Image (cartoon, helix red, strand yellow):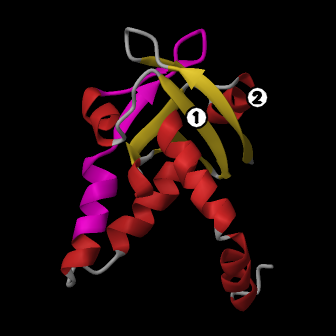
Amino acid sequence: MFIGEYQHSIDPKKRLAVPSKFRVELENRVVITRGLDKCLFVYPMKVWQELAEKLGAIPMGESATRSFVRLMLAGAADVETDKQGRILIPDYLKEYAGLDRNVVIAGIYNRLEIWDEKKWNEYKKNAEKNSDEIAEQLGKLGVY
C-alpha cells in the first residue's frame, strides 16, 4: 500500500527518484499515465494490468467513456526504474502535468501520483478547506 507525500525534484535528464519505501512494491517496471486533476498516475505492473483489463472491457458507446479510456491507455508509458530507483518521465506526460523541477509524489493506496509542487499545494489547500463536505460525501458512501 502506498501512503504519504514526498517532495522530490526532476533532474536535468528528466529522471525522478522514487521514494525508497515504494521501490520494493514497484519492482523494476511501472506504468505512468495521465491522471486526473492534471497529475500523473504511476502504477505497479500488476495493478496496471488489472486496471487495463477493466478499461478494455468498458462498453465504448458513450463518447465520455471512450475519451477516458483513451486518456488512460494511449497516454500510458511503460518505464523501467534504474539502479538508483529513478524513472524517466516522457516529455508529453511532463507537459500534461505541468511538471517543472520540484514535484510531490503522493502515495494513493494502489498507485502513486506525481504533482507539480505548486499545483499540489493549491489542490491540498482547497481539499482541506472543503474537508467537511468531503467527509459528508464519504459518509454517504459508507466509507467514513
| Magenta stretch bounds | 67-90
> What's the amino acid at mark 2?
Lys
Number of numbered discs overlaid on the protein picture: 2
Q: In the displayed structure, would residue 117 be above or below residue 63?
A: above
- Residue 10 lies, in percent from the top left, at 47, 18
> Which mark is on residue 104?
1
Q: Nearer the viewer, residue 41 or 52?
A: 41
- Residue 130 lies, in percent from the top left, at 64, 70
Specify whether 56 is left or right of 142: left
The residue at which mark 2 appears reads as 21
Specify whether 45 is left or right of 128: left
Specify whether 65 is left or right of 8: left
> What's the amino acid at mark 1?
Val
> Which mark is on residue 57?
none
Badge 2 marks a residue whose secondary structure is: helix
In percent of the image, x 45 and y 16: which residue is there? 15
- Residue 134 lies, in percent from the top left, at 66, 76
- Residue 44 lies, in percent from the top left, at 56, 41
Image quarter of residue 55: bottom left
Asked if the magenta segment contains residue 41, the reply would be no
Q: In the displayed structure, would residue 111 be above or below residue 10?
A: below
